[in-house]
Amino acid sequence: MRALHTVHVTSWLEVLDPGLLTTVQDAGRPGLAHLGVPASGALDRPSARLANRLVGNDEDAAVLECTGSGPTLRAGRGGALVCVTGAPAPVHVAGRTCDVGVALWVPAGEVLRVGPASAGLRSYVAVRGGLLVEPVLGSRSYDVLSGLGPAPLAAGQRLPVGPTSGTVPAADVVPLPDLDAEPVLALVLGPRDDWFVPEAALLLTTARWTVTADSNRIGVRLAGPPLVRRRHEQLPPEGVVTGSVQVPADGQPVLLFADHPTTGGYPVLAVVEEDALAAAAQARPGSTLRFTAGHRS
Amino acid sequence: MIRSRPAGSRAVVLDLDADAEPAQIASAVHLLAEQLGVALTEVVPGAQTVLVAATDRAGLQHLLAALPRLPSAPAAAETTGAVLELAARYDGPDLEHVARATGLSVEQVVHRHSAVVYRSAFSGFAPGFAYLSGLDPALRLPRRETPRTAVPAGSLAVADGWTAVYPRRTPGGWHLLGTVVVPVFDLQADPPALLGPGQCVRFIPST
């Protein structure tokens, strides 16, 4: 059944310890929502792109997305040029402490260890050549909702690494976002703001929202004052975009991430701007965030 | 009359009249965008809406300005295309329950369910899960009070005004009438979903 697929694997990374939840992610598989296929892809896209640039990859090459605490990997024959971005975490190569946000050489047989994030939630590991796991519907991203794409990392697995091309940029230090500050996410009201009492929009943008533990790549469940609906009938299912602030019957909003269901039956009060989603993806359970109303189109 | 509701900076939800076919409007939106040279990332029919996302805000505004020129929905016969006929074994665990709850015999349930040409209205819940419209009103039942934790792949089911085929093993709250053997979601196929929006389908009872 499997389509023939020519892969130029030049090396590999062996997974010694997968970390808490580490998945392969790239730019996802957008354009298939009408068939019920979520877009998926790296949640903190700027960090994934930065990591790729720093090892001389195409920006949308497949990287590792680590959640909370990263993996321990051994470089295969040929070694690996890697870079860790996103949530800052202790990084060790062959036992030596290294920096995030810089390209690191891991010699063949030596070990890269990415520890628990000291701020933020999701660290990204790019490897020069990109991860060449089998693509599914044009993407190597793992989608936690539908299960499409390569399964999360497991100990003993070998991740194929592609051939290198182009040059590695010379960058000593790159600016990394401050993940300690409380994120303030710009949003646009609608599409269903008229399904809520007028105070709901004001409450959404003035209250402080706590990220609950019940959050994942599908969405972030937030706790705060209930957002009250004006209309109580069932909303006929409709398409929703990533960044939607969907409000179930209990009035506690859910901010939808890349693996969200493509259609939903809860009204969407507002949509967070795309360039604010990276900060949302770095919000830890127990931390707080706020929203601010941007323009309305 | 189409009302557009903002869904972020580069997407809108088009609110349609009750008699409009979202899948047809979606095709018309694709056509209009092509004429205008506007690049779209997603066009997603819902039950009474179409979500339209463009690659950028300017493209979206361009499309919205031209919306009054949206090609009127072509006659249903033109877009129907071929009716897909899928063999179905009516051997589902809820067949007798559905018969009891609707006051029909099992034979009548099978007959009424297989007599209709359904149209895929929109997708959701899981890749390849299509909400098929056209269910005989006599078969209309609310969902199960307690969803099953696992419904086998290929299950042919009804709930509310819809019928559907479960693309793979998932939890599910619909009433299971039978089984469709042909996979409705196949990663090797292009497109991967057999029942994309607008597709017409009939179920042929088989043993």
Image (cartoon, helix red, strand yellow):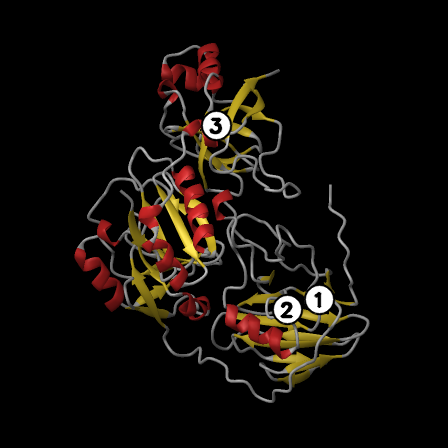
Q: Helix, strand or loop at disc 2?
A: loop
Residue, disc 3: B157
Residue A16's tag is 1
- Residue A257: horizontal and vertical position, in percent? 45, 58
Give the residue type at disc 2. Answer: Pro
Q: Quadrant of residue A67?
A: bottom right
Q: Helix, strand or loop at disc 1?
A: strand
* Residue A7 visible to an observer of this rendering: yes
Q: Chain of mark 2?
A: A
Residue, disc 2: A71
User: For the residue carrying disc 3, how many other residues have a C-alpha within 10 Å: few (<14), some (14-19), or many (20+)?
Assistant: many
- Residue A61: horizontal and vertical position, in percent? 63, 66
Tally of numbered discs: 3
Number of the front mark, 3 or 2:
3
Residue at 50% from the left image edge and 32% from the top image edge = B199
Q: In whole angstroms, how far apart are the C-alphas of marks 3 and 2?
A: 42 Å
User: For the residue carrying disc 1, how many other residues have a C-alpha within 10 Å: few (<14), some (14-19), or many (20+)?
Assistant: some
Q: In whole angstroms, how far apart are the C-alphas of marks 2 and 1?
A: 8 Å
| Of residues B9 and A197, the one drawn nearer to the viewer in this rendering | B9
Tag 2 near tag 1, CB within 8 Å: yes
